[in-house]
Image: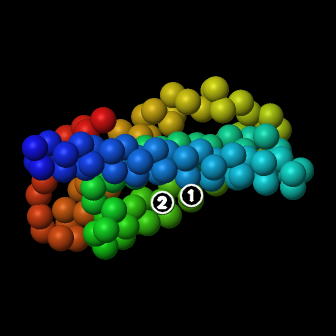
Amino acid sequence: MYRVLKRAAIKKMRLIRTSLLLLVIALVGYVGTTYVSAKGLDQKWATAFLGTIVPFSFVIYFHRNRLLRWSFWTSLLLCFSIHVIAIWICFQYFLAMFRNFSPLLWYPVMLFEMFALLISQKRIEEMLTGERYTMTLHL
């Protein structure tokens, strides 16, 4: 009986933690896009912001059981710095003629980047720690 109650409490706590994480990610996305539009910047920079938030929040959500490891955050920070430089070059130079660039057009790039980030973050973390692990999807 106690084991069943404990298992139910763990599931409830996991659901609350996951819901809170998704709420924080949505709040950051909303505040960021509102800030970009309030500053009067072009819509393409709001798309760039969403193109950063969506893939990285997916990686954080996917690795939510590894959030307390320094190697996770170090590898994610390295991936983030490379991503910011690449996004800035892409939006500043290649998309310079566009003032409005819809996030809908950027979704295929975000989808590709999610999987590229999962792989690169995992490999960088393995190089930092020397450990190998298998990724499994826990929904």
Residue 108 screen position, x and y as percent: 51, 28
Residue beneath the point at 64% across and 26% down: 104
Q: Nearer the viewer, residue 6 or 130?
A: 6
Q: Is residue 134 above or below residue 124?
A: above
Residue type at the position of mark 1 = Val
| Residue lying at the far front of the rendered structure | 1
Q: Nearer the viewer, residue 106 or 59?
A: 59
Q: Nearer the viewer, residue 65 or 80?
A: 65
Residue 2 at least partly seen:
yes
- Using a 10 Å C-alpha cutoff, classify the residue at mark 2 as few (fewer than 14 neighbours), some (14 to 19) or many (20 or more): some
Residue type at the position of mark 2 = Phe
- Residue 70's disc is none
Residue 88 screen position, x and y as percent: 64, 54
Residue 120 screen position, x and y as percent: 31, 52
Callout 2: helix, strand or loop? Answer: helix
Drawn side of residue 23 relative to residue 122, left or right? right
Drawn side of residue 4 relative to residue 56, left or right? left
Count every numbered label the image shows and give the total: 2
Question: Toward which corner of the image does residue 106 lie, by quadrant?
Answer: top right
Residue 93 at least partly seen:
no
| Quadrant showing the C terminus | top left
Residue beneath the point at 19% across and 62% down: 126
Callout 1: helix, strand or loop? Answer: helix
Which residue bears the numbered disc 1?
Answer: 84
Is label 2 in contact with label 1 (beta carbons under 8 Å)? yes
Q: Is residue 21 above or below residue 131?
A: above
Real-space Cα separation, disc 2 to disc 1, in angstroms:
6 Å
| Quadrant showing the N terminus | top left
Residue 44 screen position, x and y as percent: 74, 41
Which residue bears the numbered disc 2?
Answer: 80
Residue beneath the point at 63% across and 26% down: 105
Drawn side of residue 98 relative to residue 82, left or right? right
